[in-house]
């Protein structure tokens, strides 16, 4: 059964001669929670606006339920949006804001009252009916925006970084809330964020974007465990990305050692990128380790230590629950299934080396220090 | 220093308001003299309201002020809308300056040039008495227009474009979104533009002098014609009434503007 609701086909878009989308192909299924994830300027918001009808693609097609809707204006689409800064109508109170969409459709006041009450109930806004948006907190405004968008019973809800302006605690609560609302209503959610944690914890499908291109589409576990390139590996959580070669299937050679691994299908001795997550490296005594190195930095993170280990000049980030002292020599042990092998890409060599990591603070506190391009990216990301 | 600045302030106030004060006081003078105050009376106000020509010109002035400023508000608001939506930055700047020129232009130049234009067009259309009620309406609408644009345009700039998108997202056509969401936000600017046009029209003399005819007299024209003979003391009463009206309108403008500012401040405070 094909339950594809929205189809994007080779969408391209540029603003003032600068290309922001270079060929986006995407299928979004009914009742799915899809997240467009990427750094700012990657084109995720533009993609959302094209689906919402606020921008039109230069080339390519948008299909909704099998119909091409390129020329359909925003007000005729069965799609509603929660805007980045909520965009609540300041001259209307909470009740009238939520009722807005129904009033436009000329629905009877009695029905409106019933549905608004239902919406306010679901979003926990009962009792706020007569308040103006300017008198509400960020979290409350957020709820009004969601209620206002959902009352029209859209097929799809678009959310443009809806939690960006909230503090951490409130954000976690709202994440659960959104997930609950999505389950209860069965509406397809398309969610835009630059927060990888948010994307992983909420979505059915994550779409990782960079430089106007889709890098990877997959479930959160796929994206985390099987990143397709160095960009995705680095953007989704911390990762050590090391140059390596594949002498044969199930063998990977890097850092001067040949490891058993579970990947294959590469050409003999093909150059590859190896990803190892910081939590997948075990700290062992030097003689038991596959690799050995010197601890160059230790940061206490609460439930674990984040340590930087210098292995022949390449700095690894490792998360461990055992304390190790700085300058101590330790051994590293890596299980075969902790090693993920990726094909080389345009992002190879740009990410995943923590050599600059411990120097970040020096750069920040010294205004004269020259920050190179790669380092700058490391600081920003 | 502090007393000095206080004294200075009062001197400035005195210079500004002494003439008006004298006028107001003498409008209540019983006798017909400028040099001696012989007692309080409404005599000249009574006389004013028996002067049918004066009352007719007052009516003309009010009708003209309301209709011309209403027209200017309508045209000006949509002109501001067009200016706001213009994509080309250079063209936008150029159009903006062009609309502002009538404000800088000396009234006498505006008046003479409008008269010439009206007479010329009248000649082409074969009308002998083109000047009058309608030319006055056109002229007053024209010189009020830039002030309306000036007070509405900033409101457009402050408007958050995502509110418009939100309205369309919820099913409004672009036109409906404008009336339901954007116009309420613009309203303080529209109202103050209207009041500004109203006061400008009410007290305009120079331009009116050129584009009107004796059978359509406004109040300023009537008063001027009076001064050619002997000033009637009832004119003091009339001027006092005008001052009170203008004062009330100015307070209203400040009040309307104040409401807009206050809601904005409250919004910023909660951010």
Image: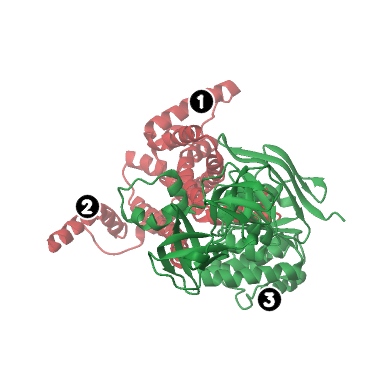
Residues flagged by tags 3 and 1 on a common chain: no
* Chain in green (letter): A
Tag shown at residue B119: 1
Left or right for A192, reference B265: right
Q: Chain of mark 1?
A: B
x 62%, y 75%: residue: A125
Residue situated in front as seen by the camera: A10 or A160? A10
Q: CA distance from mark 3 to mark 1?
A: 69 Å
Q: What colour scheme governs how the chains and residues are painted in the rendered image of this protein?
A: by chain
Q: Please give the residue where the numbered disc 3 appears in the rendered image.
A: A121
Image coordinates for residue B241, horizontal then vertical, percent: 39, 56
How crowded is the residue under tag 2: few (<14 C-alpha within 10 Å), some, or many (20+)?
A: few
Q: CA distance from mark 3 to mark 2?
A: 64 Å
Foreground disc of the pair 3, 2: 3
Tag shown at residue B15: 2
Left or right for A63, reference A171: right
Left or right for B23, reference A218: left
Foreground disc of the pair 2, 1: 2
Q: CA distance from mark 2 to mark 1?
A: 42 Å
**Mark 3 near mark 1, Cβ–Cβ under 8 Å?**
no
Q: Is residue A291 above or below residue A172?
A: above
């Amino acid at each position: 059964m094909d339950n594809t609701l929205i189809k994007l086909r080779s969408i391209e878009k540029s603003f003032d001669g600068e290309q922001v989308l270079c060929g986006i192909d995407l299928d979004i299924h009914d009742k799915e929670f899809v997240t467009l994830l990427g750094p700012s300027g990657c084109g995720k918001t533009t993609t959302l606006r094209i689906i919402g009808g606020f921008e039109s693609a230069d080339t390519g097609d948008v299909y909704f339920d099998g119909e091409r809707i390129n020329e359909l204006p925003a007000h005729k689409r069965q799609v509603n949006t929660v805007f980045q800064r909520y965009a609540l109508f300041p001259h209307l109170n909470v009740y009238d804001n939520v009722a807005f969409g129904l009033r436009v459709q000329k629905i009877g006041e009695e029905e409106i009252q019933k549905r608004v009450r239902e919406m306010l109930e679901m979003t926990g806004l009962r009792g706020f009916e007569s308040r103006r948006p300017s008198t509400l907190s960020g979290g409350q405004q957020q709820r009004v925006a969601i209620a206002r968008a959902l009352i029209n019973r859209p097929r799809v809800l678009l959310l443009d970084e809806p939690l960006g302006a909230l503090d951490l605690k409130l954000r976690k609560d709202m994440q659960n809330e959104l997930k609950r609302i999505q389950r209860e209503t069965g509406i397809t959610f398309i969610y835009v964020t630059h927060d990888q944690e948010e994307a992983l914890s909420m979505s059915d499908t994550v779409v990782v974007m960079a430089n106007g291109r889709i890098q990877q589409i997959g479930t959160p576990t796929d994206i985390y465990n099987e990143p397709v390139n160095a960009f995705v590996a680095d953007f989704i959580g911390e990762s050590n990305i090391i140059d390596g070669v594949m002498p044969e299937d199930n063998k990977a050679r890097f850092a001067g050692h040949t490891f058993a691994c579970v990947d294959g299908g590469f050409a003999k001795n093909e150059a590859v990128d190896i990803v190892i997550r910081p939590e997948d490296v075990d700290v062992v005594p030097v003689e038991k380790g596959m690799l050995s190195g010197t601890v160059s930095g230790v940061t206490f993170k609460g439930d674990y230590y984040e340590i930087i280990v210098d292995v022949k000049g390449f700095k690894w980030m490792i998360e461990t629950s055992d304390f190790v002292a700085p300058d101590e020599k330790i051994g590293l042990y890596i299980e075969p299934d902790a090693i993920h092998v990726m094909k080389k890409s345009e992002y190879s060599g740009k990410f995943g080396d923590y050599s600059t990591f411990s120097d970040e603070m020096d750069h920040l506190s010294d205004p004269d220090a020259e920050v190179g391009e790669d380092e700058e990216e490391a600081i920003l990301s | 220093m502090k007393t000095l600045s206080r004294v200075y302030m009062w001197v400035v106030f005195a210079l500004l308001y002494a003439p008006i004060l004298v006028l107001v006081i003498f409008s209540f003078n019983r006798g017909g003299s400028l040099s001696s105050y012989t007692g309080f009376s409404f005599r000249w106000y009574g006389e004013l309201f028996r002067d049918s020509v004066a009352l007719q010109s007052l009516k003309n002035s009010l009708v003209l002020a309301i209709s011309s400023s209403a027209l200017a508000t309508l045209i000006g608001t949509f002109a501001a809308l067009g200016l706001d939506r213009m994509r080309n930055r250079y063209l936008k700047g150029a159009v903006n300056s062009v609309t502002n020129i009538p404000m800088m232009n000396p009234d006498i130049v505006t008046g003479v040039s409008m008269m010439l234009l009206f007479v010329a067009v009248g000649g082409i259309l074969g009308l002998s008495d083109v000047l009058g009620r309608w030319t006055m309406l056109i002229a007053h609408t024209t010189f009020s227009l830039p002030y309306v644009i000036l007070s509405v345009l900033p409101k457009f700039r402050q408007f958050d474009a995502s509110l418009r998108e939100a309205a369309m997202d919820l099913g409004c056509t672009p036109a409906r979104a404008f009336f339901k969401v954007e116009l309420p936000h613009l309203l303080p600017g529209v109202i103050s533009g209207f009041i500004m046009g109203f006061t400008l029209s009410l007290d305009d003399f120079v331009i009116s002098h050129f584009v009107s005819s004796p059978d359509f007299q406004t109040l300023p024209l009537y008063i001027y014609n009076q001064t050619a003979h002997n000033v009637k003391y009832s004119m003091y009463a009339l001027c006092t009434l005008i001052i009170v009206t203008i004062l009330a309108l100015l307070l209203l403008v400040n009040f309307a503007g104040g409401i807009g500012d206050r809601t904005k401040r409250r919004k910023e405070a909660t951010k």
